[in-house]
Amino acid sequence: MARRFTDKQLVIASHNAGKVREIADLLAPWSIEVHSAGDLGLPEPEETGTTFAENAILKARASTAGSGLAALADDSGFSVAALGGAPGIHAARFAEREDGARDFDWAMERLHEAGADAGDDQAWFTCALALAWPDGHVEVFEGRVKGRMIWPPRGTMGFGYDPIFVPTGHEVTFAEMEPDAKHTMSHRAIAFRDLIDACFDPPA
Protein backbone atom coordinates (compact mmCIF):
# COMPACT_ATOMS: atom_id res chain seq x y z
CA MET A 1 0.00 0.00 0.00
CA ALA A 2 1.29 3.44 -0.92
CA ARG A 3 2.33 5.90 1.76
CA ARG A 4 -0.16 8.69 2.46
CA PHE A 5 1.00 12.30 2.11
CA THR A 6 0.12 14.41 5.17
CA ASP A 7 2.73 17.20 5.00
CA LYS A 8 1.72 20.87 4.71
CA GLN A 9 4.55 21.84 2.34
CA LEU A 10 5.80 20.32 -0.89
CA VAL A 11 8.61 21.16 -3.30
CA ILE A 12 7.91 20.84 -7.01
CA ALA A 13 11.28 19.61 -8.25
CA SER A 14 11.39 21.65 -11.44
CA HIS A 15 12.78 24.88 -12.88
CA ASN A 16 10.19 24.82 -15.71
CA ALA A 17 7.66 27.55 -14.91
CA GLY A 18 4.94 26.01 -17.09
CA LYS A 19 5.31 22.60 -15.48
CA VAL A 20 5.39 24.07 -11.95
CA ARG A 21 2.24 26.08 -12.64
CA GLU A 22 0.41 23.04 -14.04
CA ILE A 23 1.29 20.82 -11.07
CA ALA A 24 0.49 23.59 -8.58
CA ASP A 25 -2.94 23.99 -10.20
CA LEU A 26 -3.58 20.26 -9.82
CA LEU A 27 -2.62 20.43 -6.13
CA ALA A 28 -4.70 23.54 -5.36
CA PRO A 29 -7.65 21.68 -3.74
CA TRP A 30 -5.36 20.33 -1.00
CA SER A 31 -4.21 23.77 0.23
CA ILE A 32 -0.59 22.62 0.35
CA GLU A 33 2.11 25.30 0.45
CA VAL A 34 3.97 24.68 -2.80
CA HIS A 35 7.55 25.75 -3.54
CA SER A 36 9.49 25.22 -6.74
CA ALA A 37 13.09 24.04 -6.87
CA GLY A 38 13.88 27.18 -8.83
CA ASP A 39 12.40 29.48 -6.17
CA LEU A 40 14.45 27.70 -3.49
CA GLY A 41 17.65 28.00 -5.52
CA LEU A 42 18.09 24.24 -5.73
CA PRO A 43 20.35 23.00 -8.56
CA GLU A 44 19.01 20.80 -11.31
CA PRO A 45 20.53 17.32 -10.93
CA GLU A 46 22.05 15.58 -13.91
CA GLU A 47 19.39 13.32 -15.40
CA THR A 48 21.33 10.09 -15.78
CA GLY A 49 18.37 7.70 -15.68
CA THR A 50 17.36 5.60 -18.67
CA THR A 51 13.61 5.85 -18.01
CA PHE A 52 11.13 8.56 -17.07
CA ALA A 53 10.67 6.96 -13.65
CA GLU A 54 14.41 6.88 -12.90
CA ASN A 55 14.84 10.55 -13.80
CA ALA A 56 11.78 11.58 -11.78
CA ILE A 57 13.20 9.78 -8.73
CA LEU A 58 16.59 11.48 -9.19
CA LYS A 59 14.98 14.91 -9.31
CA ALA A 60 12.62 14.30 -6.38
CA ARG A 61 15.40 13.01 -4.13
CA ALA A 62 17.69 15.92 -5.06
CA SER A 63 15.03 18.49 -4.09
CA THR A 64 14.23 16.63 -0.89
CA ALA A 65 17.91 16.51 0.06
CA GLY A 66 18.35 20.20 -0.69
CA SER A 67 15.23 21.44 1.07
CA GLY A 68 14.49 18.97 3.87
CA LEU A 69 10.91 18.85 2.56
CA ALA A 70 8.98 16.23 0.63
CA ALA A 71 9.29 16.76 -3.11
CA LEU A 72 7.29 15.88 -6.18
CA ALA A 73 9.18 15.50 -9.45
CA ASP A 74 7.88 15.08 -12.94
CA ASP A 75 9.85 13.60 -15.79
CA SER A 76 7.96 13.76 -19.01
CA GLY A 77 8.68 13.66 -22.68
CA PHE A 78 7.33 13.60 -26.18
CA SER A 79 7.81 10.56 -28.39
CA VAL A 80 7.19 10.12 -32.11
CA ALA A 81 6.78 6.82 -33.88
CA ALA A 82 8.80 8.02 -36.87
CA LEU A 83 11.87 8.25 -34.62
CA GLY A 84 11.29 4.96 -32.83
CA GLY A 85 9.96 6.71 -29.73
CA ALA A 86 12.57 9.48 -29.64
CA PRO A 87 13.17 12.07 -28.34
CA GLY A 88 11.39 10.51 -25.31
CA ILE A 89 13.33 11.16 -22.11
CA HIS A 90 15.59 13.51 -24.10
CA ALA A 91 12.71 15.75 -25.28
CA ALA A 92 14.02 18.86 -23.51
CA ARG A 93 17.59 18.22 -24.67
CA PHE A 94 16.29 17.70 -28.22
CA ALA A 95 15.18 21.34 -28.18
CA GLU A 96 18.60 22.68 -27.16
CA ARG A 97 20.63 24.58 -29.73
CA GLU A 98 24.42 24.68 -29.71
CA ASP A 99 24.45 27.61 -27.26
CA GLY A 100 22.34 25.61 -24.79
CA ALA A 101 19.19 27.69 -25.28
CA ARG A 102 15.97 25.71 -25.72
CA ASP A 103 14.09 26.42 -28.93
CA PHE A 104 10.90 24.38 -29.12
CA ASP A 105 9.78 25.99 -32.40
CA TRP A 106 12.93 24.61 -34.02
CA ALA A 107 12.52 21.24 -32.29
CA MET A 108 8.89 20.91 -33.38
CA GLU A 109 9.87 21.60 -36.99
CA ARG A 110 12.52 18.86 -36.84
CA LEU A 111 9.98 16.37 -35.49
CA HIS A 112 7.44 17.36 -38.11
CA GLU A 113 10.01 16.78 -40.86
CA ALA A 114 10.86 13.34 -39.46
CA GLY A 115 7.21 12.37 -39.35
CA ALA A 116 6.54 13.67 -42.84
CA ASP A 117 9.55 11.83 -44.26
CA ALA A 118 8.40 8.58 -42.65
CA GLY A 119 4.73 9.07 -43.44
CA ASP A 120 3.88 8.44 -39.78
CA ASP A 121 2.30 11.07 -37.52
CA GLN A 122 1.76 8.88 -34.44
CA ALA A 123 3.04 10.45 -31.22
CA TRP A 124 2.57 10.26 -27.47
CA PHE A 125 3.40 12.04 -24.24
CA THR A 126 4.61 10.15 -21.18
CA CYS A 127 4.84 11.42 -17.61
CA ALA A 128 6.34 9.82 -14.52
CA LEU A 129 5.70 11.42 -11.14
CA ALA A 130 7.91 10.62 -8.15
CA LEU A 131 6.93 11.71 -4.66
CA ALA A 132 9.88 11.54 -2.26
CA TRP A 133 10.04 12.03 1.50
CA PRO A 134 13.12 13.17 3.48
CA ASP A 135 13.53 9.66 4.91
CA GLY A 136 14.19 8.31 1.40
CA HIS A 137 10.80 6.73 0.68
CA VAL A 138 9.54 7.26 -2.89
CA GLU A 139 6.26 6.53 -4.67
CA VAL A 140 6.18 6.55 -8.50
CA PHE A 141 3.26 6.80 -10.93
CA GLU A 142 3.22 6.93 -14.74
CA GLY A 143 0.72 8.14 -17.33
CA ARG A 144 0.66 8.20 -21.13
CA VAL A 145 -1.60 9.82 -23.72
CA LYS A 146 -1.49 8.87 -27.40
CA GLY A 147 -2.26 11.01 -30.41
CA ARG A 148 -0.78 12.45 -33.57
CA MET A 149 1.48 15.27 -34.69
CA ILE A 150 0.02 18.09 -36.76
CA TRP A 151 1.58 20.94 -38.71
CA PRO A 152 1.72 23.91 -38.46
CA PRO A 153 1.73 24.33 -34.67
CA ARG A 154 -1.53 25.61 -33.18
CA GLY A 155 -2.39 27.28 -29.89
CA THR A 156 -0.71 29.43 -27.25
CA MET A 157 -1.92 27.96 -23.95
CA GLY A 158 0.50 25.06 -23.67
CA PHE A 159 4.28 24.74 -23.52
CA GLY A 160 6.98 22.56 -25.02
CA TYR A 161 5.60 20.31 -27.77
CA ASP A 162 1.93 20.97 -26.96
CA PRO A 163 1.25 23.01 -30.15
CA ILE A 164 1.88 20.04 -32.49
CA PHE A 165 0.09 17.31 -30.50
CA VAL A 166 -3.56 16.36 -30.96
CA PRO A 167 -4.64 13.64 -28.50
CA THR A 168 -6.64 10.71 -29.81
CA GLY A 169 -10.36 11.48 -29.92
CA HIS A 170 -9.84 15.26 -30.10
CA GLU A 171 -9.46 17.84 -32.85
CA VAL A 172 -7.52 20.51 -30.96
CA THR A 173 -3.92 20.52 -29.79
CA PHE A 174 -2.87 20.54 -26.16
CA ALA A 175 -1.90 24.19 -26.68
CA GLU A 176 -5.42 25.05 -27.88
CA MET A 177 -7.13 23.41 -24.91
CA GLU A 178 -8.26 25.39 -21.91
CA PRO A 179 -6.03 24.36 -18.98
CA ASP A 180 -8.96 22.79 -17.12
CA ALA A 181 -9.74 20.58 -20.13
CA LYS A 182 -6.11 19.51 -20.53
CA HIS A 183 -5.88 18.76 -16.80
CA THR A 184 -8.61 16.13 -17.17
CA MET A 185 -6.86 13.98 -19.75
CA SER A 186 -3.17 14.76 -20.19
CA HIS A 187 -0.35 12.32 -19.46
CA ARG A 188 0.42 14.35 -16.35
CA ALA A 189 -3.24 14.26 -15.29
CA ILE A 190 -3.35 10.47 -15.66
CA ALA A 191 -0.24 10.01 -13.51
CA PHE A 192 -1.50 12.63 -11.07
CA ARG A 193 -4.85 10.89 -10.59
CA ASP A 194 -3.06 7.68 -9.71
CA LEU A 195 -0.81 9.60 -7.29
CA ILE A 196 -3.77 11.27 -5.60
CA ASP A 197 -5.75 8.04 -5.33
CA ALA A 198 -2.78 6.28 -3.74
CA CYS A 199 -1.25 8.97 -1.53
CA PHE A 200 -3.75 11.75 -0.76
CA ASP A 201 -6.94 11.89 1.29
CA PRO A 202 -9.90 13.71 -0.32
CA PRO A 203 -9.55 17.50 0.01
CA ALA A 204 -11.42 19.07 2.89
Image (cartoon, helix red, strand yellow):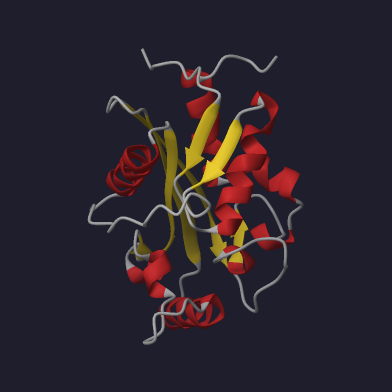
Instruction: Find residue 82 and report its horizontal and vertical position in percent.
Output: 39, 71
Asked whether residue 14 is in view, the answer is: yes
Which residue is pictured at 38% across the width and 33% down the height?
68
Say which of 86 and 35 sits in front: 35
Q: Is residue 185 above or below residue 14?
A: above
Classify 178 as above or below 33.
below
Counting from the top left corner in percent of width and height, residue 119 is at 46, 76
Please tell me which residue lies in front, 74 or 162: 74
* Residue placed most toward the observer, 58 or 178: 58
- Residue name at image x 32 percent, y 45 percent: 62
Residue sitting farthest toward the bottom: 98
Q: Position of residue 129 (x, y in %)?
A: 43, 39
Quadrant location of residue 153?
Answer: bottom right
Residue at the location (42% across, 31% down)? 70
Q: Is residue 173 visible?
A: no
Q: Nearer the viewer, residue 29 or 65?
A: 65
- Quadrant occupied by the C terminus: top right
Residue extending farthest to the right is 178
Q: Position of residue 106 (x, y in %)?
A: 51, 83
